[in-house]
Image (cartoon, rainbow, N blue to C red):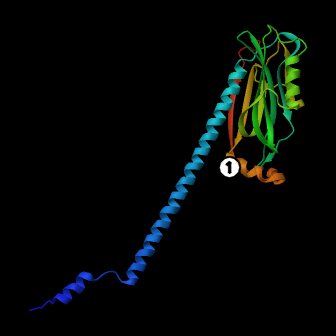
Amino acid sequence: MKLHSPYCLNRRRQSGLTLVEMLVSSALMLFILLGLTLMFGQTQRAFQGGTKQIDVLEGGRAALDLIVRDLEQMADSGMIGVTNFFVGTVNNALDLKPGLTNEIQDLYFLTHYNREWHAVGYSVKNTVPGVGSLYRYDVADPSERPLSNNRLFIDYGTSLSGNFTNFNRIIDGVIHFKIRAADASGVATNASTIGYSVHTTNSLPHYVDVELGILEPRTLEQARGMGNASTAFLQQQVGKIHIFRQQVPIRNAPR
């Protein structure tokens, strides 16, 4: 027969965790909280990285689509000495590792729609050596024929070498902008041998290949803060460049 006194029952009801048990429980809670914090941080960084990469892809595609739409409207002036199409190579390329070389070129051409001639151009203005922002140039000439003294092309060159008048920024982080003009047989025009391609009077290329390379925003921010060391840094960032390519048939080219 067992007797249970009220004193013993009260002690059992009031018994709790020991100091050791409390310390172990606290350590487990801290460990769980630390794991959740690290997991949240990694998830947030992955989400932000994915969002930035999506922004780069969307921005690159949008910029390429704009260039393609403009090129599809290209037309020849039919006037002697008037520049219809021009590509010039800018001497600010980087030797990217491993074994790749980016190119930065200036693009100019005439378009004709809504009974107006437009001088359209694309150029990269450097913010860091070898990488910059892509700008679009657009000036309209309401006359039926472009000015016979090639004024549209001359004004473009003046703006390009001056204060970038009539240029509007399209996208940042451009590290590669290459234009290849080709004839009906797919043979490149003289850009590969003398550094530029030009078509005047009633001449136009039959195809134009466009390559646009965009640097990821975080890598661009790092390069901006490095000063003179940015060139060596960018040469090692091939994996952070997204390349967009498209061939554009010029429908107004002479057949």
Q: Residue furthest top?
A: 144
Most foreground residue, 131 or 80:
131
Closer-to-camera residue (199/214) = 214
Mark 1 element type: helix
Q: Residue reaching furthest left?
A: 1
In the image, residue 19 lies at what x, y percent?
Answer: 39, 83
Which corner quadrant holds the N terminus?
bottom left
Q: Quadrant of the C terminus?
A: top right
Q: Is residue 221 above or below residue 102?
A: below
Residue type, mark 1 in image: Arg
Name the residue that disc number 1 marks: 218
Q: Residue at x 82, y 15 (%)?
A: 203
Kindly indicate the quadrant of the structure image that contains residue 114: top right
Residue 185 is at least partly visible in this image: yes
Residue 162 lies left or right of residue 113; in this view the side is: right
For the residue carrying disc 1, how many other residues have a C-alpha within 10 Å: few (<14), some (14-19), or many (20+)?
A: some
- Residue 95: x %, y % from top left: 81, 46
- The residue lying at 75 percent from left, 12 percent from top is 116
Image x and y of residue 84, in percent: 82, 18
Considering only vertical position in the picture, is 253 above or below 25?
above
Q: Residue at x 72, y 47 (%)?
A: 220
Name the residue at 66% across, 28% down: 65
- Residue 151: x and y in percent read 88, 17
In this rendering, would 59 be left or right of 28? right
Q: How many discs appear?
A: 1
Residue nearest the observer in this picture, 66 or 141? 141
Residue 97 visible somewhere in the drawing:
no
